[in-house]
């Protein structure tokens, strides 16, 4: 069995007038993330980790923010298509370990629903997805509530055949 590991990282600014989407769910908050798509930093970090593990470049290569096709797109669709690319290349997810850094809102109550939605989109078991939430102790752009970041590490396995 061949296994590969990938790492992904994403950041988006918090702004008024946008919905806050994280882990494929809409979270009640006074600010949302700014981006060409719905700006779901968690899904974007996971996509980058998956694509990197399979040596398939990054999310911007496959889903460029210069394309009108992806304007305001639901990032769950990008994740679904990323999984399709991986499976076509003969890979399957082993597991994901992800962390979201945000001062507010508090994310821990939303993690079970994020895991459920992501597992459904990816066609994997919820147990294969770990999501953690942290703050930056009021330091940096995250601490000043100017943005949210996410990182993800994934393990993928090459299917035999």
Image: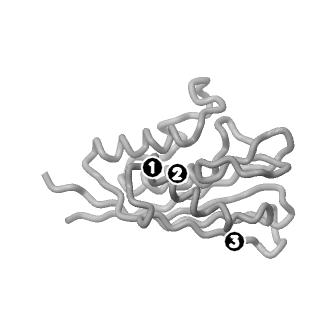
Residue 64 position by quadrant: top right
Report the disc number at residue 120.
Answer: 1
- Mark 3 crowdedness (10 Å alpha carbons): few <14, some 14-19, many ≥20: some
Residue ID at (60%, 69%): 132
* Residue closer to the observer: 69 or 125: 125
Viewer-closest of 25 and 149? 25
The mark found on residue 117 in the picture is 2
Question: Residue 112: x, y in percent?
Answer: 57, 63
Gap in Å between the C-alphas at discs 3 and 2? 20 Å
Quarter placement of the N terminus: bottom left
- Of the numbered discs in the image, which one, if any, rests on residue 143? none
What is the distance, in whole Å, between disc 1 and disc 3 at their CAs?
24 Å
Q: Are marks 1 and 2 in contact (CB under 8 Å)?
A: yes
Secondary structure, mark 1, is helix
The local secondary structure at tag 3 comes to strand
Provide the secondary structure element on which disc 2 rests.
helix
Question: Of callouts 1 and 3, which one flags the residue occurring earlier in the amino acid sequence?
Answer: 1
Near mark 1 (Cα within 10 A), the count class, few <14, some 14-19 or many ≥20, is some
Distance, label 1 to label 2, CA atoms, is 5 Å
Circle nearer the viewer, 3 or 2? 2
In this rendering, the answer to whether 50 lies above or below 64 is below
Q: Which residue is mark 3?
A: 134
Q: Position of residue 105 (x, y in %)?
A: 78, 61
In this rendering, the answer to whether 43 lies above or below 134 is above
**What sort of colour scheme is used for the picture?**
one colour
């Amino acid at each position: 069995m061949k296994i590969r590991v990938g790492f992904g990282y994403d950041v988006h600014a918090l702004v008024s007038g946008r919905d806050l989407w994280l882990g494929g769910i809409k979270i009640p908050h006074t600010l949302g993330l700014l981006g060409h798509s719905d700006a779901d930093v968690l899904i974007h970090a996971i996509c980058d980790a998956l694509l990197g593990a399979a040596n398939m470049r990054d999310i911007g290569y496959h889903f460029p923010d210069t394309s009108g096709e992806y304007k305001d797109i639901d990032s769950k669709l990008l994740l679904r298509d990323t999984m399709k690319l991986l499976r076509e290349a003969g890979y399957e997810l082993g597991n994901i370990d992800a962390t979201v850094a945000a001062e507010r809102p508090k994310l821990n109550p939303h993690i079970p629903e994020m895991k459920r939605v992501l597992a459904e989109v990816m066609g994997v078991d919820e147990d294969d997805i770990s999501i953690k939430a942290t703050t930056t102790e009021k330091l940096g752009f995250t601490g000043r509530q100017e943005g949210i970041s996410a990182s993800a590490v994934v393990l993928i396995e090459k299917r035999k055949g």
